[in-house]
Image (cartoon, rainbow, N blue to C red):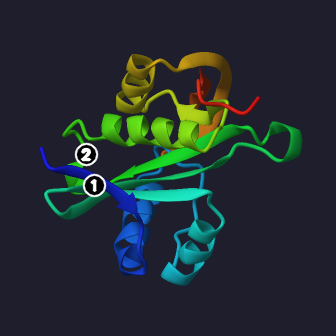
Amino acid sequence: MGIRFRNYKDCDLECMTSMWNEILEDGMSFPGTELYESSQFQKMLDEQTRVVCMEKDGELVGYYILHPNNIGRCSHIANASYVIKKTMRGKHLGKFLVQNSIEEAERLTFRGLQFNAVVSINKSALIIYEQIGFQKIGIISGGFLLPDGSYSDMYILFMSLTGGKN
């Protein structure tokens, strides 16, 4: 299949910003509403613990950002966001991003991976997360505002990691 993971490079920034903004414009999964300019996005990426790109047959098709879910006494639990290029969605690539992020989080000695706001209508993401072993640990009824003005539930998901800090 020709999938490869690598750290992001400055030359990826424009493409990565565009892919993130596509998700924001869709309004169905990420909480943000303001689109990024490349310079702003670069600052956000610089704050992450890890930014990993996924290439398929040499083309940048997705990436994830990984960082602590919280600060201080809660910083041993990771959080991640996943991005797939719009033209590559539905090709079963998301599971590779999630699996790689789990491996990376374990390598970085996080004790768990938590998602705070998985929108209930994001069925493809929920299927991937559940197949990989995430557990729904909470629901926030009507917690996500959709573009049409209606509200969707969102889930809190968690997976314990084996390579965690003591």
Residue 61, picture quadrant = bottom left
The answer to whether residue 75 is left or right of residue 111 is: right
CB under 8 Å between discs 2 and 1: yes
Which residue is disc 2 drawn over? Answer: 89
User: The C terminus appears in which quarter of the rendering?
Assistant: top right
Does any portion of residue 129 appear in the rendered image? yes
**145 left or right, relative to 122:** right
User: As shown in the figure, which amino acid type bears the numbered disc 1?
Assistant: Lys
Q: Position of residue 83 (x, y in %)?
A: 40, 52
Left or right of residue 33, residue 143 in this image:
right
Residue at left 59%, top 49%? 31
Q: Is residue 46 above or below residue 151?
A: below
Where does the image place residue 104, in percent across and percent down from the top left? 50, 43
Res 86 label? 1
**Image quadrant of residue 92?**
top left
Q: Looking at the picture, does residue 23 appear above or below residue 102? A: below
- Compared with 103, 129 (above or below) is above
Secondary element type, mark 1: helix
Residue sitting at 61 percent across and 38 percent down? 144
* Image location of residue 51, percent across then percent down: 50, 59
Q: Quadrant of residue 48?
A: bottom right
Which quadrant: the N terminus? Answer: top left
Q: Residue 55 in the image: x percent, y percent?
A: 25, 57
Q: Marks 2 and 1, Cα distance to the nearest angstrom?
A: 5 Å
Q: Is residue 151 visible?
A: no
Q: Nearer the viewer, residue 51 or 156?
A: 51
